[in-house]
Amino acid sequence: MSVSYLTSKARPVLVGAAGRGSVAVEQIKTGEVIVAFGGRAMGRDEFDLLPEGQRSRSIQIEDHLYLAGAPEPEPADFINHSCQPNCGLSGATVVLAMRDIEPGEPLTYDYATSDGSDYDEFDCMCGVATCRGKVTGQDWMLPDLQVRYRGWFSPYLANRIAVLSRPSGQRRAFAY
Ligand SMILES: [Zn+2]
């Protein structure tokens, strides 16, 4: 039994050298749930002991907390990153359609909205004109992304952004 949910309107596919991705198999409307990630929550020390493949199928859910995906790949694991995505986060673990999506379209979200540490950084080959080239755990700090994904950040990142935008005297200290 899978730990994560994937809508029946999507399925995993092989995508070139990058490995696997997911595509829509029928039309998906704005706001429909694509994926709900499940797994086992753990701190960074324990998370770092997992195999790299499993870590790449996991999601950061708080400053120092990660939701580790299943040990073996599941259909829901292959929502890839794109710098111009058609899906976005709702809360820390649910992925929604940001717009109407047609059959055959790859399903993607921007990892800048979920990742706030360096556990899954890579050279991006998403191919869009606005591709950042490298995806890092610091991308949530980019001002243009903070504007573009307002309302789509994981709650812990939305909180970081809100704190950073306050006058400096009111900032709460973070350790990340
Ligand atoms: Zn890209």
Image (cartoon, rainbow, N blue to C red):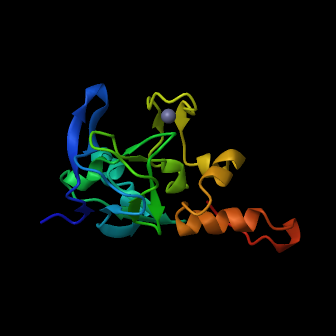
Depicted 151 relative to depicted 14: above or below: below
The N terminus is located in which quarter? bottom left
Report the residue at 33% width, 40% height from top. 105
Q: Is residue 158 left or right of residue 76?
A: right
Report the residue at 73% width, 69% height from top. 173
Depicted 64 relative to depicted 117: above or below: below
The C terminus is located in which quarter? bottom right
Q: Is residue 87 visible to us here?
A: yes
Report the front residue among 123 and 71: 123
Report the residue at 30% width, 69% height from top. 40
Q: Quadrant of residue 6?
A: bottom left
Q: Is residue 100 left or right of residue 77?
A: right
Give residue 102's position: percent from left, percent from top.
Answer: 33, 44
Report the residue at 39% width, 54% height from top. 48
Report the front residue among 135 and 63: 135
Report the front residue among 172 and 17: 17
Find the residue positioned furthest to the left: 1
Q: How many marks?
A: 0
Give residue 154's position: percent from left, percent from top.
Answer: 52, 64
Q: Is residue 174 left or right of residue 20?
A: right
Give residue 109's position: percent from left, percent from top.
Answer: 44, 49
Give residue 43's position: percent from left, percent from top.
Answer: 43, 67
Q: Is residue 118 visible to us here?
A: no
